[in-house]
Image (cartoon, rainbow, N blue to C red):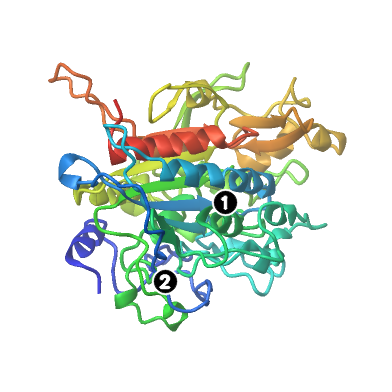
Amino acid sequence: MASAPHAVMWALLGVACSEPALVLGTLGTSDSGSVGGESVSASTSGSSTSATTGPADLPPLDPCDPDLGCQNKIDVLFVIDNSGTMGEEQLNLAKNFPLLIAQLEALEDGQGHQVGADVNIMVTTTDADNPACHGAWVKPDYVPARGSPISTPCSERMARFTGNNMPPVVVEEACTEVCDPENPVAPSDQFIHFDRYGDNVEAGDAAAALACIGPQGIDGCGYEAPLEAMLQALNPTGCWNDPAGCDDPAWAWIDEPFLREGAVLAIAIITDEADCSVRDFSIMSDVDFMELHPDTDLRMASSAICWHAGVACSELDPETGKYSGCVAANRDREGAVGVSDEQAVLQPVSRYIALLDAMRAQGREVIMLGVLGVPEVTEHAAQPPHQPIAGGVDDLEYRIWRDPQYPAGDILPDEWSIGVRAVDKQFEFGIGPGCTGYDEGAAAFTGQAVPPVRIRSVCESLNVPDDPNTVLDDSQIRCCIESICDEDFSPAIRCLTGLIQSAVSPVG
């Protein structure tokens, strides 16, 4: 069973603890229930193994004493979008995983001494399940992760890298360029673990294992639910977090929990669309949340449902097509704004903020990186946490789609050439792009992404504001938002490790 602090945390959220990985939501007009289906399978390589013994001649390491403000235990959760447009982005991310591992290994305390990072890294997808994503187009062997860990090498999941569209898009290189199919590497646990003495990777190292398990494929649900996937991954009663209390035979091979008491929790969410963590699944067939299809002039289902069900925008300028602003909002079944959490059709952002606040109330530092649909960051702070100080969310606009093709408009040249117009994109997403990516080296577009209103709200809630009653600036940055349209994710990785550095032990 869950320990007392975990039970208290879950009780604060009003979430039942009777199931290892409770999936909350409503089907049709029901007020409670869960989406059915089997749990996703993870590695069945046997029982978990602890870090291997390292060489006896390691240099001395200064003790990392939590009572002196130092913490070397770090739990990192990656929530990676596995929908049809994410192949390039997953490859970009995986190529930067060695940088992440190297920077975690080099973390220092306030005196410049390495703290000897003791790290767990777990990976899951943005697919928390949605009835609208079930149909003949879904592969028979596909099972939504619903926040559970994915710890198998991508080379064992190659079917995932063929999309569900027709004709199907195939991006196997998102796996094979970073994970050798002949020699795949994976951890022996449901997460990667490493410290100064070794790791739980038997045929490689932590960086190689993360590059292999990180790519998730492109056949996941197109109604991405990264916030709900995050919550389910952090569920203290989930088998991956409470193996001693788990009675699910699918997870019987797990010995060690991913989440550890007192460890710094670092969350990275990587997605190119709006969060669609649904509370009332009747909205998936509700015309009130749909856009008009430009060919039929009928309201039809698209990803625009997610935007309209969870965001409120104000003052659209008809000349520029810009809104004065957009914020996360609770909407009821009629689309009314400002309703209670209990009436909201999407899971309210307060649900996720409450989860992270409850974890912080237990004494745990929580930080978050979002690689999302915002303009590219043009400048970062010189000192940790290396947060964006120009570009990024500061340059974000909320507006409708524009013709013609980019850069005069928003439509990518390949789409413009086959007749795609702004009205088609407006139908598809309900809002214009937060960013458009172009790789000058490859002379190719890397895609577009929708502004991240709900995820941004949760991420920025972690920042600690300055206390006006004190002389010194005691604000703390705990959220970093980078652009998924950037062709290089290394600044995002540096910001993530900078946030972790600030949480472990501030430098300077």
Residue 463 visible in the shown view? yes
What quarter of the picture does the C terminus occupy?
A: top left
Furthest-right residue in this view: 417
Q: Residue at x 50, y 65 (%)?
A: 187
Q: Residue at x 71, y 30 (%)?
A: 438
Q: Is residue 72 left or right of residue 300?
A: left
Would you name the residue on which mark 1 appears? 81
Q: Which mark is residue 382?
A: none
Q: Residues within 10 Å of mark 1 (few under 14, many from 20)?
A: many
Would you name the residue on which mark 2 appears? 49
Q: Count all numbered tags in the image, as a single digit.
A: 2
Quarter of the rendering containing residue 3:
bottom left
Quarter of the rendering containing residue 245:
bottom left
Q: Earlier in the sequence, mark 1 or mark 2?
A: 2
Position of residue 437 relative to residue 168, above or below, is above
Q: Residue at x 22, y 25 (%)?
A: 474
Residue type at the position of mark 1: Asp
Residue type at the position of mark 2: Thr
Residue 336 visible in the shown view? no
Q: Position of residue 320 (x, y in %)?
A: 62, 17
Position of residue 310 relative to residue 412, above or below, is below
What quarter of the picture does the N terminus occupy?
A: bottom left
Q: Position of residue 118 (x, y in %)?
A: 35, 53
Of residues 4 and 346, the one drawn nearer to the viewer in this rendering: 4
Furthest-left residue in this view: 469
